[in-house]
């Protein structure tokens, strides 16, 4: 598919909308090359939210995934980088975005550099970032320019799936208010892997292992402290927001986070170090690390029903998740200085008309640029005046 969705309309007719705040941070244009179903595609959103409609398999989620690559991490599908390359095309892919920020226009780009093209001996493919024409070694710095948050149909299982997806969801939110969080988590995991490798090989110098454990404790406590602080702020944002979506009561189930609630950081750090020393034997045998912030869970309760999220109905869980995401977007606006770009994949289809109306109203109030998808255009009638509509048909994208 080689389509262009550039529209000749000026943006002014839709940016001065009566509903909602003017956007201060948005993806003005997105360009994809060899990205999944897209050979080459340009879409101009302007300073609007965007509604993408079309049949199953039309390419709606692919486009949202491309935007999610304008943030650090593995994107909204957490796909293997090589799977994103268009089948039967050259193995690299690229996404480029023109992003309007309160400090002016920025050119952001990202793409896959296949292992074979890397000069150093690297075992894996790598995603690079480009910012205003400069190549970055990784897209980590994107988080300083743009925050992107998303809800996908896969996340409907967030409260019943394993703890790791909830922890990732938590850490993405924390990173929106604590810029160094992603780096701290990576540093902790890197040292943890190094310790696990040495332990499983056997015969390593205990002093060296001890120094790795001290570093793990240092990074681990920083990770846990940022999570606690973020959770406190998020809980206040939930309490203050007059949302139509249910309120969540949030807590953290984790050794360090629980320790920090009642003890000074240095004490928690020392205790964690002791636990690591004590678990060397077990960890050497299992090849894993039995304690630490890499095991922390995000515990969610439905406030009004006083019910753990995992025991709520599917619709209630979805509503809780939307409520948390909206509160987090409000908090991002104050902490980061601008609300996040929100990618809401198939969210509207699961809500009744009244709830949909509330959602669109709250989104307008937050001032996020929102990218919404759905098969049916009528789901978005209430967004008529606030979004630019695109429809995918026969491999083409048409602006409506
Ligand atoms: N690497 C790839 N190369 C080429 N095509 C791909 C690749 N990965 C996925 N696709 C195809 O892209 C198409 C569009 O997928 P996408 O998930 O974006 O659809 P969608 O519009 O979100 O559909 P739905 O409404 O079912 O969610 C699918 O047919 C899929 O098979
Ligand atoms: Mg889809």
Image (cartoon, rainbow, N blue to C red):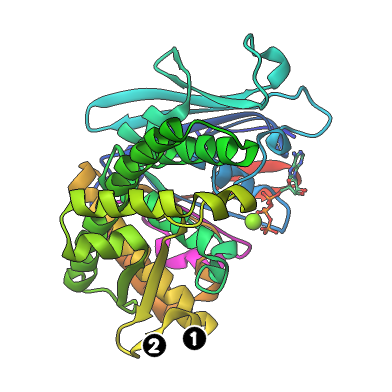
Q: Which label was assigned to residue 33? A: none
Residue under the point 50% across and 49% down: 280
Residue under the point 54% across and 81% down: 314
Q: Find residue 354 and report its horizontal and vertical position in percent.
A: 40, 80
Q: Find numbered disc 2 in the image and state the secondary structure of the residue it sits on.
A: strand
- Position of 272 with respect to 87 (left or right) is left
Determine the image quadrant of residue 364. bottom left
Q: Which residue is mark 1?
A: 311
Q: Quadrant of the N terminus?
A: top right
Residue in the foreground of this view, choosing between 60 and 391: 60
139 in relation to 295, above or below: above
- Position of 313 with respect to 364 (left or right) is right
CA separation in Å, label 1 and label 2: 7 Å
Q: Which residue is mark 2?
A: 307
Instruction: Give, as a single range, the part of the protein colored magenta.
Output: 365-386
- Marks 1/2 in contact by CB < 8 Å: the verdict is yes
């Amino acid at each position: 598919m080689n389509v262009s969705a550039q529209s000749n309309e000026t943006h002014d007719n839709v940016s001065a909308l009566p509903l909602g705040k003017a956007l201060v941070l948005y993806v003005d244009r997105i360009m994809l090359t060899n990205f999944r179903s897209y050979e080459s595609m340009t879409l101009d959103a302007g300073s609007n939210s965007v509604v993408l409609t079309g049949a199953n398999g039309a390419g709606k989620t692919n486009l949202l995934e491309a935007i999610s690559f304008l943030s650090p991490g593995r994107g909204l599908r957490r796909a293997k980088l090589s799977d994103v390359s268009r089948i039967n095309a050259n193995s690299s892919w690229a996404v480029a975005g023109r992003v309007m920020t309160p400090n002016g226009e920025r050119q952001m780009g990202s793409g896959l550099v296949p292992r074979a093209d890397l000069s150093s001996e690297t075992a894996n493919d790598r995603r690079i970032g480009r910012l205003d024409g400069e190549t970055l070694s990784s897209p980590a710095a994107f988080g300083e320019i743009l925050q992107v948050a998303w809800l996908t149909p896969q996340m409907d299982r967030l409260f019943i799936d394993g703890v790791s997806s909830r922890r990732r969801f938590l850490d993405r939110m924390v990173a929106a208010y604590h810029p160094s969080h992603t780096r701290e988590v990576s540093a902790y995991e890197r040292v943890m892997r190094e310790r696990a490798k040495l332990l499983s090989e056997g015969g390593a110098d205990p002093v060296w292992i001890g120094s790795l454990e001290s570093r793990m404790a240092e990074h681990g406590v920083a990770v846990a402290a940022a999570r606690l602080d973020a959770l406190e702020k998020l809980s206040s944002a939930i309490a203050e927001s007059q949302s139509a979506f249910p309120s969540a009561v949030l807590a953290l189930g984790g050794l360090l986070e629980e320790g920090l609630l009642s003890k000074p950081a240095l004490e928690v750090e020392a205790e964690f170090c002791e636990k690591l020393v004590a678990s060397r034997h077990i960890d050497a045998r299992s090849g894993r690390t039995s304690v630490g912030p890499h095991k922390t869970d995000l515990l969610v309760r439905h406030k009004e029903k006083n019910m753990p999220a995992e025991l709520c109905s599917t619709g209630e869980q979805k509503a809780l998740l939307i409520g948390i995401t909206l509160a987090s977007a409000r908090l991002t606006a104050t902490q980061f200085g601008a609300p996040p770009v929100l990618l809401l994949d198939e969210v509207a289809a699961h809500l009744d008309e009244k709830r949909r109306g509330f959602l669109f109203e709250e989104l307008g109030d937050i001032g996020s640029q929102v990218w919404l998808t759905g098969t049916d255009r009528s789901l978005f009638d209430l967004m008529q005046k606030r979004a630019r509509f695109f429809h995918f048909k026969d491999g083409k994208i048409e602006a409506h």
